[in-house]
Image (cartoon, rainbow, N blue to C red):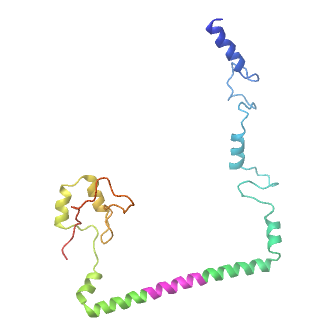
Amino acid sequence: MSSSSLIRSTRSRFAPKHIPSNTRGYAAPGIDQSGDPKKEIIRRVLYPSNIRNRSTPIGTWRPDVGRALQRAIPSVQAHETIERAWLLHKRHIRKAREAETARKFECMKKAMDVLHDLDPRLYMEANKKDDPRARSSEEKEAMKTMKVSEIRAMEARIRGLFPRELRIPTDTPSRTGWKYEWKSFTRPI
């Protein structure tokens, strides 16, 4: 048996019986080639029919919601009472948070008044508006020798917060060790 006849016989054995070999299967209307209903299921889930005789799997329409609510809460007055109680509970939580915030603000204001009485210079330093874009001459000189990525990291750094370029504490030490020579840029006060 030659190889060409073997190839022909395997082609004819695996060719689908219901689709002619000279037509394209995807162009044939009404013929299900794959037998796999996944596409149809996905289409039905994403685009449910407009007929409202059954519930949709994604919950856009449920005919049994009214009955379920009627079983759980038998009257409209009970439902409205529960809703009002829930809104009252949320209002109590909101008022408690607002009271806590006001208390903390008053404590901070008292502490700032005490600081003003004790040391006006420290009070002015604590309330000084700092321009985050301002750079000292030492920082400007250091930026001239840095790489672009290091400059961007330095510009993204927020003053007064923990430096981003330091390593995050981990359970195991770094392979390269600790950077003992690292120093932050300090501005003269």
- Reply yes or no: does residue 106 show up in magenta: no
In depth, the one of 182 and 106 nearer the eye is 182
Q: Is residue 133 left or right of residue 31?
A: left
Quarter holding residue 66:
bottom right
Position above or below: 92 against 187 = below
In depth, the one of 147 and 30 nearer the eye is 147
In depth, the one of 172 and 118 nearer the eye is 172
Q: Position of residue 142 (x, y in %)?
A: 18, 60
Image: magenta residue range: 92-104
Residue drawn at x 72%, y 30% is: 33
Residue drawn at x 28%, y 53% is: 176
Residue drawn at x 72%, y 41% is: 40
Q: Position of residue 188 (x, y in %)?
A: 18, 74
Residue drawn at x 19%, y 68% is: 136
Q: Residue furthest bottom?
A: 117
- Reply yes or no: does residue 103 show up in magenta: yes
Q: Position of residue 146 (x, y in %)?
A: 21, 55
Specify the quadrant that holds the C terminus: bottom left
| Magenta region, main secondary structure | helix
Position above or below: 179 against 31 = below
Quarter holding residue 134:
bottom left
Q: Residue furthest top?
A: 1
Specify the quadrant that holds the N terminus: top right
Q: Is residue 107 left or right of residue 35?
A: left
